[in-house]
Image (cartoon, helix red, strand yellow):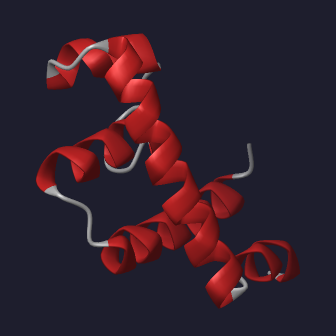
Amino acid sequence: MDAKLLELVNEKLRLILDEAVFEEQSERIFKLHYGIDCKRIEPKAISKEVKIPLKKLKIELTRIDNRVFNILKKHDLFDALYSE
């Protein structure tokens, strides 16, 4: 992946993180799932890391993804990713 594009995606994810106002655990899951300031890891490893059952984690990931999607829509960040 192009380093410039990767940096742009990380920047947009940080903006989303700032706006989303997650609880502490949800923010940690978000960072691990999307690889912000760390290596991206799979849900099974996230479940072990944050010590919650995989089934509950999948529900939380769905909530996080929905919130991220709504923020992307609200700010037209999809367009920003493709226009730069």
Percent of width and height locating residue 31:
34, 46
Compare residues 59 and 5 and report the one nearer the observer: 59
Percent of width and height locating residue 82:
85, 73
Tell whether 56 sits left or right of 48: right
Q: Quadrant of residue 38?
A: top left
Tell whether 25 sits left or right of 54: left
Classify 74 as above or below 78. Answer: below
Instruction: Tell me what residue is drawn at x 70 percent, y 61 percent.
Output: 5
Classify 59 as above or below 13. Answer: above
Instruction: Tell me what residue is drawn at x 37 percent, y 47 percent.
Output: 30
Classify 35 as above or below 46. Answer: below
Residue 40 shows up from this direction = no
Q: Quadrant of the N terminus?
A: top right
Compare residues 34 and 68 and report the one nearer the observer: 68
Numbered circles on residues, count:
0
Instruction: Tell me what residue is drawn at x 39 percent, y 32 percent.
Output: 39
Q: Quadrant of the C terminus?
A: bottom right
Classify 71 as above or below 34. Answer: below
